[in-house]
Image: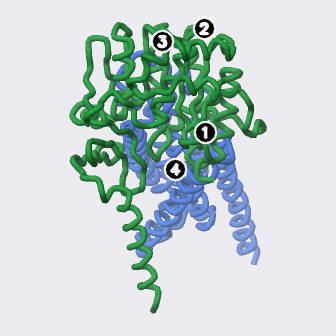
Chain colours: A green, B blue
């Protein structure tokens, strides 16, 4: 007899905790795309993009309407740490558009660079254009496509990119085919020795170990970039050996002024780039044959 | 309705093999997305391609299997479906890159790329597996009165097998094994199913013959 009451209170608890995160923000746009529910909220001058809000996802990306260039999230800023390894990219590939703040910042920093953005969900492209000030330019093109076939094709055409950002793993379903060793080998195919790969990945769960092992097998040593203020872990690597710390510090100093308006504290980054192995190296590498990333994340 | 060769395989064995077939169909279907994603990505359309091709292949299999069952239904043909499907699953393992790469190069649109890849990889073995259900119904039916009941029982069991194959593969098998190991597992399961049917057929025939001889002697 008491069961319905317990059930009802459980439901109201879930509802109230789910709503608590957004209750103060005004929803200005809602859309259900092929892949997810997209919500745009606004509170004060802060406008945010959320995926699958009813499942309690965090903000994907936010923009300050009165200071559009400022990057709001740590992981977005951290994506520019790759400049410490390659400071003059002429061609940039960003997998995963979100609100578009990463490609917009690149376009602003390097107006002459060719920027290709790959986003699987057309609705995300529309929302980025309508609400997050994103627009294609003569140098910046958005491809509505899956990242893996896009990179495979670029490799076959022998195209190379100087700076590659993998940011396809936000949201609550992980594209397992973009975590595998074979995929990373295809990414290597579109890199020059001095190109840099910046991958926004997972810092928790068993997946952290599996993913670290996979990157290590594909690239050898890589920079593991974590900040205490964010749950994201950024992997930064290149084909040639990683540069010494002194060079990172020097580059950071030369970039500090240019990155200030975006809020990227690049001077603090070199000391955070670690090559220390802090994962279980006995874990199995992820391959096209074995990549139960979504199950591993849950365990 | 006269009793014929269909009686050589006990109903329980026919039903159990239909369960195995349902299990293997869904195991391979669930792995389909994993097999295609390196070339065609993980978009919704890739799942659409796979499900469409499995549905079409099964539909044709039902039609052909039903037709075949009208002419001299035999346990040997029934066993042949399992063995044939097992053999045609092997190219999914050994030829998948050779099949998908030219399609990937020829078709830029991943929707049609995945559709054609699904046809070449999955259509033949799945349609052979589709022939099993109507044929199994024929082997289980002894008279018109219970034919509907037998069909219902058979679809109940084979669909249970499909449910088990879907859940088992997506929850556990992909966590424990590599894709190709699971596919080999499905192949050996189907081969074993075919052999069990053959064994039951010949053992059953012996029994029938012994029984007839005993009756004749008496």
Residue A193's label in the rendered image is 2
Q: Earlier in the sequence, mark 1 or mark 2?
A: 2
Same-chain check, marks 4 and 1: no
Between the residue at mark 4 and the residue at mark 3, the CA separation in whole angstroms equals 40 Å
Residue B190 appears anywhere in the view = no
The x, y position of residue A208, in whole percent, is 64, 40
Q: For the residues labelled 4 and 1, say whether their Cβ atoms are less than 8 Å apart.
A: no
Residue A264 appears anywhere in the view = yes
Compared across the picture, whether B84 is left or right of A14 comes to right
Residue A291's label in the rendered image is 1
The x, y position of residue B155, in whole percent, is 46, 63
Residue shown at the point (46%, 47%) measured from the top left: A172
Chain designation of label 2: A
Residue shown at the point (30%, 36%) measured from the top left: A64
Q: Badge 3 is on which residue?
A: A161
Q: Is residue A20 above or below residue B30?
A: below
Element carrying mark 3: strand
Between the residue at mark 2 and the residue at mark 3, the CA separation in whole angstroms equals 11 Å
């Amino acid at each position: 007899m008491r069961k319905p009451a317990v059930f009802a209170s459980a439901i109201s608890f879930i509802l109230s905790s789910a709503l608590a995160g957004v209750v103060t923000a005004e929803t200005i746009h809602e859309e259900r795309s092929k892949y997810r529910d997209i919500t745009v909220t606004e509170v004060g001058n802060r406008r945010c993009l959320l995926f699958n809000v009813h499942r309690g996802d965090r903000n994907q990306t936010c923009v300050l309407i009165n200071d559009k260039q400022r990057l709001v999230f740590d992981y977005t800023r951290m994506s520019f740490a790759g400049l410490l390894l390659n400071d003059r990219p002429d061609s940039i590939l960003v997998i995963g558009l979100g609100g578009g703040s990463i490609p917009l910042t690149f376009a602003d920093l390097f107006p002459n660079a060719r920027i290709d953005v790959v986003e699987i969900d057309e609705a995300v492209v529309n929302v980025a254009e309508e609400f997050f000030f994103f627009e294609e330019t003569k140098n910046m093109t958005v491809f509505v496509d899956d990242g893996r076939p896009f990179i495979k094709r670029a490799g076959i055409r022998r195209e190379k990119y100087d700076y590659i950002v993998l940011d396809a793993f936000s949201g609550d379903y992980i594209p397992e085919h973009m975590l595998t060793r074979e995929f990373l080998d295809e990414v290597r195919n579109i890199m020059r020795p001095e190109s840099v790969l910046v991958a926004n990945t997972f810092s928790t769960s068993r997946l952290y170990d599996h993913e670290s092992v996979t990157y290590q097998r594909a690239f050898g040593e890589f920079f593991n970039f974590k900040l205490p203020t964010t749950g994201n872990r950024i992997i930064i690597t290149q084909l040639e050996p990683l540069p010494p710390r002194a060079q990172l510090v020097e580059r950071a100093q030369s970039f500090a002024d240019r990155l200030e308006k975006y809020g990227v504290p690049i001077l603090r980054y070199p000391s955070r780039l670690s090559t220390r192995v802090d994962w279980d190296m006995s874990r199995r590498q992820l391959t096209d044959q074995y990549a139960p990333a979504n199950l591993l994340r849950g365990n | 309705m006269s009793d014929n060769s269909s009686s050589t395989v006990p109903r329980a064995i026919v039903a159990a093999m239909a369960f195995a077939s349902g299990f293997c169909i869904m195991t391979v279907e669930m792995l389909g997305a994993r097999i295609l994603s390196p070339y065609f990505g993980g978009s919704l359309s890739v799942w659409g391609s796979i499900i469409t091709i499995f549905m079409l292949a099964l539909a044709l299999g039902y039609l052909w299997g039903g037709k075949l069952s009208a002419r001299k239904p035999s346990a040997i043909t029934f066993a042949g479906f399992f063995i044939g499907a097992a053999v045609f699953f092997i190219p999914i393992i050994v030829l998948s890159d050779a099949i998908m790469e030219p399609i990937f190069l020829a078709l830029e649109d991943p929707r049609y790329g995945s559709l054609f890849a699904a046809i070449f990889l999955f259509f033949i073995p799945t349609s052979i597996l589709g022939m099993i259900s109507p044929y199994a119904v024929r082997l289980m039916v002894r008279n018109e009165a219970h034919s509907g009941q037998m069909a219902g029982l058979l679809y109940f069991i084979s669909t249970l097998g499909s449910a088990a194959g879907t859940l088992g593969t997506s929850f556990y098998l992909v966590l424990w094994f590599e894709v190709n190991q699971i596919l080999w597992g499905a192949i050996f399961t189907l081969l074993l199913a075919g052999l069990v049917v053959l064994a039951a057929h010949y053992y059953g025939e012996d029994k029938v013959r012994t029984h007839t001889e005993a009756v004749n002697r008496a």
